[in-house]
Image (cartoon, rainbow, N blue to C red):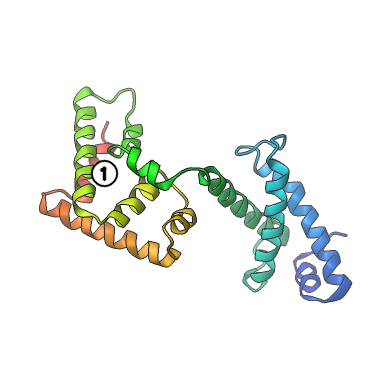
Amino acid sequence: MERNNEQWIDDLTAGGLQREDALTDLRQIIRSGLPYSLSKYLSPSDPQFDALADEVVQDTLLRALDHLHTFEGRSKFTTWVHKIAVRVALTELRRKRWEDVSLDEIIESSEAPSNLSLLESESTSPDLIAEQKDMAEHIRRVIDEELTERQRKALIALGVHNMPVEEVARRMGMKRNALYKLMHDARLRLKSRLALEGLSAEDVLQAFEAG
């Protein structure tokens, strides 16, 4: 049975068999769309795929039911739900990527923000490469000298290694809002210190955007 938007909402907010039938159909729709949506990130033939898909379907159903009141009908209801499923899946994939990685190890092994050097192109001049490396070393020195240990951990994990916010918060024993506050304070301290040394955020970005 194909439902329109109103029918989905009516069935999912109803009770008894009407709601159960709608949940069963929605579960199948979510599950059937995942192999294509996640193919760039995880092959459907991967041994981990089925377990991930089961987790994603269940989590997506719960989130969709909790947020039915936010659905505005600007798209098909199933499209809206599928977008939730993809976000849930990518978050879970990121979390699994880091679950066996020690936060302390990546902090201690991290050198000057090396991922900034990925912005270098083949045409970048030797002088510009040297300038970028000097700037990266300068930023790392400021990070080490200016920030608290917890601020440094959070900044490197999030800003350099792109670790998921949820995972960093869990490892550091913090709520998300507390982590955001920690990062906000860290950025303010860095901005103030760089300003004292005659550098602005624009100066730093310009060094890595040149060439």
The residue that appears at 19% across and 48% down in the rendered structure is: 142
- The residue positioned 25% from the left and 56% from the top of the image is 148
Give coordinates of residue 91: x percent, y percent: 56, 51
Q: Which quadrant would residue 171 be assigned to in this image? A: bottom left
Residue lying at 29% horizontally and 37% vertically, measured from the top left = 111
Spot occupied by residue 34 in the image (x, y as percentages of width and height): 70, 46
Residue 189 position within the rendered picture, expressed as x and y whole percent measured from the top left: 21, 58
Q: Quadrant of the N terminus?
A: bottom right
Instruction: Identify the image quadrant of residue 118.
Output: top left
Q: Is residue 152 above or below residue 110?
A: below
Q: Position of residue 184 (x, y in %)?
A: 31, 62
Residue tagged 1: 205
Could you tell whether 17 is left or right of 80 in the image? Answer: right
Q: Is residue 89 left or right of residue 178?
A: right
Give the side of residue 204 with respect to residue 102, left or right. left
Amino acid type, mark 1: Leu
Crowdedness near tag 1: few (<14), some (14–19) or many (≥20) residues, C-alpha within 10 Å: few
The residue depicted at 80 percent of the width and 69 percent of the height is 7
Disc 1 is placed on an element classified as helix
Q: Is residue 70 above or below residue 75?
A: below
- Tally the marks: 1
Q: Nearer the viewer, residue 77 or 201?
A: 201
Quadrant containing the C terminus is top left
